[in-house]
Amino acid sequence: MGKIQMTTPIVEMDGDEMTRILWKMIKDELLEPYIDLKTEYYDLGLEHRNETNDKVTMDSAEATKKYGVAVKCATITPNAARMEEYHLKEMWKSPNGTIRAALDGTVFRTPIIVKGIEPVVKNWKKPITLARHAYGDVYKNTEIRVSGAGKAELVFTSEDGTETRELIHQFDGAGILQGMHNTDRSITSFAHACFQYALSTKQDLWFATKDTISKKYDHRFKDVFAELYENEYREKFEDAGITYFYTLIDDAVARVMKAEGGFIWACKNYDGDVMSDMVSSAFGSLAMMTSVLVSPDGVYEYEAAHGTVQRHYYKHLKGEETSTNSVATIFAWTGALRKRGELDQLPELVEFADRLEKATLSTIESGKMTKDLAMITSLSDVAVLNSGDFIKAIRETLDSNR
Ligand code: NAP
Ligand code: MG
């Protein structure tokens, strides 16, 4: 059988440590034998980011805008320890932050469901996808520790000098103050990304805030979503047979626990931070989680939800055996290949992505898995494989399903 041909390159962003090792194994064993892989390669490994003064990260984001689909390996976000370890010229910013800012995107995270790894919540039968607004609110706040009695006011000065003032609190003793903001532009692009992702995955969309208490701030989020839905999306949703549902955040939490899954849950920045950790750990593992950044103009960047698995990498460097789970990184590739196949009308490529995902899951369901899954599986008779052998086992399943 000949290799599957591609027409447009995928933007390939290589990364660091253990995930960089997995990246090469996945390409060698699971992709290149089957596909005439066309990528535009950017090395976001920390050494190369440092050599290029991080220009490579911006270049990879620009290429993603140009081609529309990227796949990213996990990368190190430098801290003080990494400055020394890699002799860095500067403490370069998080590549994910740089790419997110350039694409103005929303991150969607979905658990990968497999028999034998049961969600803690019994009634969750289908994945719950979390869409987190990634700008503003408490993450861009300004705070004051109030030392004693005094008056706190919220003041907005418009460009023509007009002031709007609201009393926050008349303090009669020490306390605390916080100011935060968001913009119509950012909320609107978040809403577009959510509606479009719901349409492209044919799932219902839920959104929740606390608009009964926050009558201007949270209410603005509710209104932006409602206006966009009525003006641009209602008809498309009805045609696709999906619904948009708004409720209060506490009601949403209660409903999510009783739901069977299969929908997208859009959350404000803080709610998304908290709820995505709850949802992902209740579904099993960060290594069984897909993550895609979607921009309002329909650009897609696929990655794993976990980091570079540094601890395993140091073992690997010492020549010790590792059992690192490559599922999320494999699914980042299949997500990108499927999207490329859809955009370029290459059904063979879409079908290959489906087959590789199926082969990955049935390998686990047959009892062959990495250590992290072996520790939580309900299956008995499990074979714990090392990093390389797990990928080879997936290849065997893939070949036997041909
Ligand atoms: P991590 O790489 O997510 O790993 C934390 C721990 O989770 C590991 O030590 C391992 O536990 C377990 N784990 C995560 N992924 C796994 C996998 N695929 N297979 C098996 N076990 C897995 O987080 P970290 O060690 O805190 O961070 C390492 C580096 O990653 C940091 O430099 C950070 O900046 C970066 N990071 C990058 C991204 C990204 O690029 N998207 C995201 C987060 C962090 P055990 O050790 O107990 O086996
Ligand atoms: Mg968090």
Image (cartoon, rainbow, N blue to C red):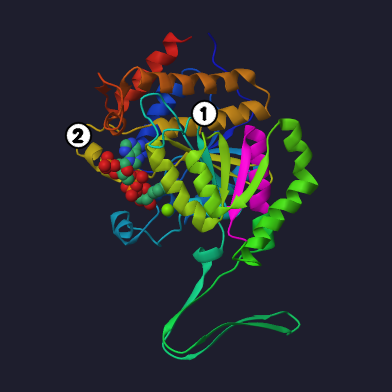
Q: Residue at x 75, y 53 (%)?
A: 227
Give x and y (percent) for residue 313: 28, 41
Q: Residue at x 50, y 64 (%)?
A: 139
The tally of labels here is 2
Q: Which residue is mark 2?
A: 320
Which tag, 1 or 2, sits closer to the chain's start? 2
Give x and y (percent) for residue 187: 65, 57
The residue nearer to you, when weighing 17 against 350, is 350
Q: Residues within 10 Å of mark 2 (few under 14, many from 20)?
A: few
Magenta stretch: includes residue 198: yes
Magenta stretch: includes residue 270: no
Q: Residue at x 40, y 17 (%)?
A: 395
Q: What amino acid type is highlighted by mark number 2?
A: Glu
The answer to the question of whether label 1 and label 2 lie on touching residues, with beta carbons closer than 8 A, is no
| Mark 2 residue's CB less than 8 Å from ligand 1 | no
Relative horizontal placement of residue 67, taking residue 279 as reference (left or right) = right
Measured Cα–Cα span from mark 1 to mark 2: 29 Å
Q: Is residue 37 visible?
A: yes
Secondary element type, mark 1:
helix
Q: Is residue 103 visible?
A: no
Mark 1 or 2: in front is: 1
Q: Which residue is mark 1?
A: 334
Q: Considering only vertical position in the picture, is 69 above or below 381?
A: below
Q: Quadrant of residue 15?
A: top left
Q: Residues within 10 Å of mark 1 (few under 14, many from 20)?
A: many
Instruction: Tell me where the magenta segment starts and ends, as one range.
Output: 189-211
Q: Quadrant of residue 243?
A: top right
Relative horizontal placement of residue 120, taking residue 263 as reference (left or right) = left
The residue nearer to you, when weighing 152 against 8, is 152
Point out which mark residue 43 bears. none
Q: Considering only vertical position in the picture, is 230 above or below 213?
A: above
Give x and y (percent) for residue 37: 53, 25
